[in-house]
Amino acid sequence: METAIILVFVIGYLAITLEHNLKIDKLIPALVMMAICWALIALGLDSFTQWFNSAEHALLDNFGLLGHEEKLHLMEETLLHHLGKTAEILVFLLGAMTIVEIIDYFDGFSTIKSFVKTKSKKRILWIFAFLAFFLSAIIDNLTATIVLISILQKLIHDKDVRIWYAGLIIIAANAGGAWSPIGDVTTTMLWIGKKVTTGHLFVYLFIPSLLCMLVPTFIASFLPAFKGQLKNNEEQDEKPKSRFSATMLYLGLGGIVSVPIFKTVTHLPPYVGMMLALGVVAVFAEIYSSSKFTLTHAEHQGGDSEGHHSPVHHSLSKIEMPSILFFLGILMAVAALESLGILFGFAQSLQDNMPMLGTELHHEGVSDVVVLLLGVGSAVIDNVPLVAASLGMFSQPIDNELWHFIAYSAGTGGSMLIIGSAAGVVAMGMEKINFFWYLKKISWLALLGFLVGAAAFMVTRTLIP
């Protein structure tokens, strides 16, 4: 039965990675895979000889000797435990996505566009690289990519020039998301899973992540694509649609940034702080939208039917629910493998067979090669299940350097292929970037940045007590 469950997981995983070829949204195989894996566990419960206790991070003693009813009760408890942990991540993401959509409702991101006052291609590259790096740390790398490419489309009309900027934005956004607990889904998973803390994440990963962005941007600035001046910049002074756009931008970003502080002070799970931030932002959004300065056009403002639009309802309708359902499916499917002790056994065999690189300093026996391979793997397949698997594979304590290296590798390694990260996939969709164009023009820059950042991490961890 274990073989059947692994087979279902592998087939589902392949369907996720080949979604563009199969023309099937990745949420469908994720949900089907999750349901079938747990159904097989329930049907073959009496045949399993081992069970993994996630709370203790150890195999349960004498599981094979338990009766059917005891095993059934244990399975239900485990399922509820994993659903609770997954729900923490999903509710957190729902809150963050809604705040970002509320900012967008008031056209808040147009404030960022006003910062770009130059026509130099090289300067614009550096402006967008730093914007992507820091903005992704606040509103996550996926959203930062969407926002910045939307702004690029208004600044640069030549698509052949614009896709070069989009490629560097992907690298910068993924690098920026790695050092912030709210910057990338995988880092958020490690943070909510009590593997990393905000302070240590910043100390360990800020410099490696910054180098991961700086090196490719510096090299790219000498390429022909970024030489000379932009031919058109006439839309630069376009005014935002709402007088409250800047206010809602700073309020929304401030609300998201306050979540780690709220967690530190109260020791409550991050989703509680995110719900509080969403509530505060929503109050101001409702007050502002009920005034005469809403996003509705002047000709519509006279009628009662067009009088007041709820920005919260509008923003909730714009949330990308397929992503939420995909995370539900993939995290619960990985939980099925973890519950049977499969991931634990795989981790043990990895540690026994992989070559060690300076194990006296590093990860208590987990090789650097394993973590670097995780980064390369995240470029080929989705980094969410890879990190979810690592949570079940390794038992190192909170803020161990292993978790920070995993956060870096999984977060930045995805830049090496355009399908390797959520930021890359959304940029591919928005700009119709060809897979092989990215592989030829951008991937080598991303690889250089990844390796320089990884080397920097190996140095910085020796300096941190």
Image (tube, rainbow, N blue to C red):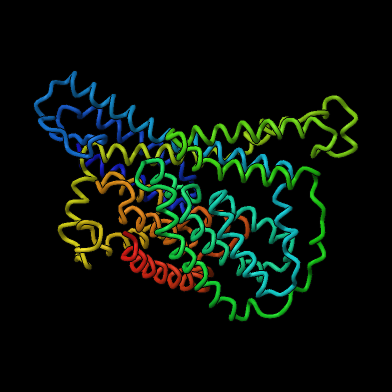
Which percent across, then down, holds residue 118? 74, 70
The foreground one among 240 and 418 is 240
The foreground one among 203 and 170 is 203
Which percent across, then down, holds residue 287? 75, 31
Q: Relative to residue 223, is residue 186 drawn left or right? A: left
Give the farthest residue toward the top: 69
Residue at 13% of width from left, 21% of height from top?
Answer: 67
Residue at 59% of width from left, 80% of height from top?
Answer: 223
Please, is residue 255 above or below residue 370 in the view? above
Q: Relative to residue 14, is residue 236 drawn left or right? A: right
Examine the image and state in which quarter residue 309 appears. Answer: top right
Please, is residue 452 above or below residue 375 in the view? below
Report whether residue 382 is seen: no
Examine the image and state in which quarter residue 366 appears. Answer: bottom left
Please, is residue 35 above or below residue 370 in the view? above
Q: Relative to residue 276, is residue 395 drawn left or right? A: left
Which percent across, then down, holds residue 221? 59, 77
Q: Quadrant of the C terminus?
A: bottom left
